[in-house]
Image (spheres, rainbow, N blue to C red):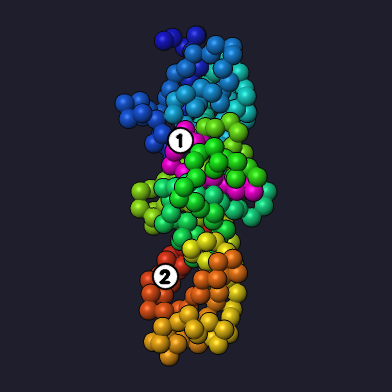
């Protein structure tokens, strides 16, 4: 290809992970065809537009709807971090991110999750409730109907959590949400829940919370040390 008939896209290092391994290069050449938008060309390379921030030609920002011309040179940058949203972020996680959902709830972040919802239903809920759809399915992020989504980086839940907190920096309110259903926890007198507790728990603990949605009862038990470590790390990542 020569420089007269093609346009060149310079893909930032953070976005090259989405390119095929054999084409994970800084510079990508595409052929303007007078019908495909810049956004279409970027997605055709494998990069979801949900992950793309400023796109710049000769110092001027252009939108995804821009029509490329031969000779154009475009710098394609990632979404700036923390990503700015019009309101406090609320999330919806796909079926493969259950552990991440529970950790977000532990931190008091509004995180809806279902283990039996298909892609179209996820998009509907995300749109109706204005939730950011979190997934590692690039095809799901490319659905035109989706108002906003984000690719979750990392295979381990700890890495996924760090990526999400660094990207969105949501306010953290640990121990305020039910890790089972995402409901809000409220303090509850011991005598109201003691029939639900094992004898050892009744003897050892006096402070309890109960989910307003599902009724699950919580207390700081022997496992809370591990959870406090998660919370401590999360506070550092969320900045």
Q: Quick check: 237 above or below 136?
A: below
Q: Name, please, the residue furthest toward the front.
A: 195
Q: Name, please, the residue furthest toward the left.
A: 22
Q: Residues within 10 Å of mark 1 (few under 14, many from 20)?
A: some
Q: Residue at x 54, y 54 (%)?
A: 112
Can residue 197 be seen from the camera position used here?
yes
Q: Which residues are magenta?
A: 129-141
User: Which sits in the foreground, 118 or 28?
Assistant: 118
Q: Quick check: 128 above or below 9?
A: below
Q: Position of residue 52 (x, y in %)?
A: 53, 35
User: Which sits in the foreground, 44 or 220?
Assistant: 220
Query: Mark 1–mark 2 contact, CB under 8 Å?
Result: no
Residue placed under numbered mark 1 in the picture: 138
- For label 2, the SS is helix
Residue placed under numbered mark 2 in the picture: 227
Q: Residues within 10 Å of mark 2 (few under 14, many from 20)?
A: some
Can residue 237 be seen from the camera position used here?
no
Q: Position of residue 222 (x, y in %)?
A: 37, 79
Q: Residue at x 59, y 53 (%)?
A: 90
């Amino acid at each position: 290809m020569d420089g007269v008939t093609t346009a060149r896209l310079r893909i930032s290092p953070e976005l090259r992970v989405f390119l095929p391994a054999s084409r994970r290069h800084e510079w990508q050449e595409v052929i303007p065809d007078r019908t495909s938008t810049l956004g279409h060309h970027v997605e055709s390379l494998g990069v979801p537009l949900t992950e793309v921030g400023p796109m710049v030609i000769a110092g001027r920002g252009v939108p995804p709807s821009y029509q490329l011309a031969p000779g154009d040179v475009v710098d394609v940058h990632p979404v700036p971090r923390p990503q700015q949203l019009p309101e406090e972020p609320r999330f919806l996680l796909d079926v493969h991110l259950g552990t991440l959902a529970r950790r977000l709830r532990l931190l008091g972040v509004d995180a809806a999750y279902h283990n039996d919802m298909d892609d179209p239903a996820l998009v509907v809920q995300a749109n109706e409730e204005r939730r950011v759809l979190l997934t590692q399915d690039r095809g799901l992020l490319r659905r035109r109907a989706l108002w906003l989504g984000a690719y979750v980086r990392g295979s381990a839940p700890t890495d996924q959590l760090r990526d999400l907190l660094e990207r969105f920096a949501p306010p953290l309110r640990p121990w305020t949400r039910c890790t089972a259903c995402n409901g809000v926890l409220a303090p509850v007198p011991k005598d109201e829940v003691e029939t639900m507790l094992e004898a050892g728990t009744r003897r050892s603990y006096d402070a309890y919370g109960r989910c307003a949605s599902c009724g699950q009862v919580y207390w700081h038990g022997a496992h809370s040390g591990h959870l406090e470590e998660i919370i401590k790390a999360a506070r550092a990542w969320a900045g």
